[in-house]
Amino acid sequence: MLKYVVRRTMCAGIVLFGATLLTYAMMMLAPGDAALEVAIARYGGRTLVDRDTIHWIRKKEGLDDPLHLQYLHWLQHVVRLDLGNSLVDEEPVLDLIRTRLPRTAQLAGAAVVLSLLFSIPVGLLAGMRQGSWLDSLGCALSVVGISMPNYWLGLLLILVFSVQLHWLPGFGRGDWRHMVLPVLTLATALTAYTARVLRSAVIEALQSEHLLALRARGVDSRLTLGRHVLRSCLIPVGTIVALEFGMVLEGAVITETIFAWPGIGDLLVTAVGNRDYPLIQGLVLLSATTFVVLNLLVDIGYCLLDPRVSLS
Amino acid sequence: MSALHDPGPVDVRFATDFFRRLRSNVLLAGAAAVAFLVTVVALAGPALAPHDPMQADLSLSLAAPCRQYPMGNDALGRCLLSRIIVGTRISMALGTAVVVFSCLSGVAVGLVSGYHGGLVDELLMRVTDIFLSLPEMVAAMAIAGLMGPGTGNLLLALSLTAWMRYARLVRGITLSVRGRSYVRAAQFAGVRTWCILWRHILPACFPQVIVLATVGLAKAVLAISALGFLGFGIQPPAPEWGALLLEGRNYLLTAPHLSLYPGMVIMLCVLSFNILGDALRDSLDAGD
């Protein structure tokens, strides 16, 4: 068990290291001298820097070194959480992320809670009554939810609830009323996806052999439902919650753009638009780290819930 | 040789089951019809457009749908229906290219990883994990944004973020097929490795890869238009679906039809491929 946890953590470490490598390689793909731009930003933006200083920075940051040394140099800064300054407003990237992250978390938290509130009952019922009209309806709605482009859904919600009905504000950040439409936009795909996964988990649990054995002995089906079926669905639900937070991060890019919600996603869109390399790197690293840590937590959680995992 | 080449009866039953479903399920038949229509429109392209998609006519600026222009006109008075029709080819061609690239590279990685095993497997799977750790949309946006707009860059960005699923799937199947007797027999007969991979292992992966590719096409179309909508994809004046939606968004108050129709077309297209993918998967499960 402990061995498994240590192994998983080491794997996660390797993956994170690889993610920094990829992030760095991404910058190499960019046209122009991106590394120089990043280095300049570290010493306060372009406006403060003349030609001699650029020369000095080139030397100091080792930008004439071979690539692998340059990467290690960059990594040293990243490990110390020094992500450099934004090229545009010259603020440290870490500070920018720190102000924006709670706002995205606010949307993400609400969307995940909302999606679980709907998807858990729907997924359970659909799985238990496989083939019923309720199941068919649930499946149809969920495939629509997955196929719905979230940018279109957001526009439709604005069109109906702010433009036509004047019930809710269409953009910006303020009281709870500003949150309703973005949260709905984010939660739709999550709900659809979660209900699907849960439905298949329930179906699988119902077909398991130990349940058949209990039935054969005449155990009341209501009793088996709570104690056996629901319990074996706990693992997929845990995975889903972790995955949902990962998915929300992606959905936030579009949702925050449509609703002008000043969070992480909005920050990324602006950063990419401005070719603000240090900021893009910081945000890509942030999302990769979140994803890897969530996955690690899920794996460890699996291991606690299901002893078979650590054996394989 | 041909006696050893045994893809098994699974494929056949899988296809029969799928066609049985297609006949009995209205929703699935509808999805297949839409997918077929989208393909035809993508192939025929401009020939089907009622008007010239680039022809501006300011007297028709933001005009609502009428009989002559069934989906109305955009800010420059161009026919929206024609623009959507021409845009179909862009979305479908790019989506197909993304699926082909990611599928080929993913399948290659999966085959090598699963068949070779050992250190190579460990290494390739770690690389796959690393690529999986970057959220698709975030990574695609960063790549497309950093390298600048352009079809090639977009293709690269979306393929780089999509090949991992194929690699994982194919590796799993290869691992389970590797020990089967017909593969062992081919190995003992001295058949070359690439030939074993091509003729004995790849056919076993085929049905599931098709399922993944169908759903992958839906995802790619969605991602292409999402990038277009954010302004990092195909650039105007090309009538890419996401870019159309981005243009329409500016006139949400005065001309909602400009946001309504492109989004609806994207959704119908994605929905039809998702439904087809689900049905293929169900047929596959029923065949096992």
Image (tube, rainbow, N blue to C red):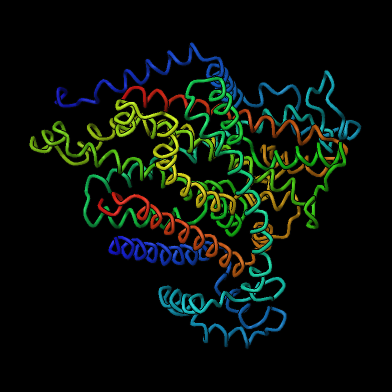
Can residue B253 be seen here? The reply is yes
Residue shown at the point (76%, 30%) measured from the top left: B80
Nearer to me, B199 or A204? A204
Judge whether B271 appears above or below B235 on screen.
Answer: above
Nearer to me, B245 or A133? A133
Q: Quick check: A151 left or right of B62?
A: left
**Residue B69 placement (x, y as % from top left):** 81, 23
Residue shown at the point (48%, 82%) measured from the top left: A62
**Residue A223 placement (x, y as % from top left):** 42, 34
Q: Quick check: A254 left or right of B157?
A: right
**Residue B132 placement (x, y as % from top left):** 44, 53
Q: Quick check: A36 left or right of B78?
A: left
Judge whether B4 appears above or below A27 on screen.
Answer: above
Can residue B153 be seen here? The reply is no
Quarter of the C terminus of chain B within the rendering: top left
**Residue A177 placement (x, y as % from top left):** 80, 50
